[in-house]
Amino acid sequence: MTIIRAELCDRLDSLSAAAQRMTVRELVQGIATIRTVAGAYGMIPVVCVADAFERAVRAEPRGCPAGLYFERLRDAIGCGAADDDAGTRMIASISVRLSA
């Protein structure tokens, strides 16, 4: 699992670094790739946050707080694979920051 977490962190770093230069479609594809890899290994928190991130990008491409989502994805990668509540808590933390 350590190798998978490292791969996801590498993908996340690459996506975060390139996000400003990407089209919305490319960003969504990058998020989907992270979600797919995480889903294959049962990393539910990563899947939850990636889903929310993708919805936010699609809803408001230029106004999406990508930095918050990238931070929460990094946190989710470090969570236990089957910690179902962690994904919900991370999405809630994004919501709280957005409403502050």
Image: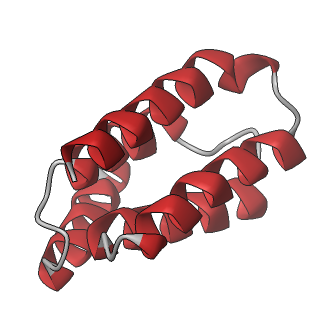
- Vertical order, 85 against 40 (above or below): below
Total number of numbered discs in the rendering: 0
* Residue occupying image coordinates x 88% and y 35%: 23
Q: Quadrant of residue 3?
A: top left
| Residue 91 percent location from the top left of the image | 31, 66
| Residue 19 percent location from the top left of the image | 68, 26
Specify whether 10 is left or right of 42.
right
- Vertical order, 70 against 58 (above or below): above
* Residue occupying image coordinates x 87% and y 48%: 25
Specify whether 45 is left or right of 24.
left
Q: Nearer the viewer, residue 51 or 36?
A: 36
Q: Quadrant of the N terminus?
A: bottom left
Q: Quadrant of residue 18?
A: top right
Colouring scheme applied when the structure was drawn: secondary structure
Q: Nearer the viewer, residue 40 or 75?
A: 40
Specify whether 42 is left or right of 75.
right
- Vertical order, 56 against 27 (above or below): below
Q: Nearer the viewer, residue 85 or 30?
A: 30
* Residue occupying image coordinates x 48% and y 34%: 12
Q: Nearer the viewer, residue 59 or 41?
A: 41
* Residue occupying image coordinates x 41% and y 37%: 7
| Residue 9 percent location from the top left of the image | 37, 34
- Vertical order, 44 against 74 (above or below): below
| Residue 83 percent location from the top left of the image | 13, 77
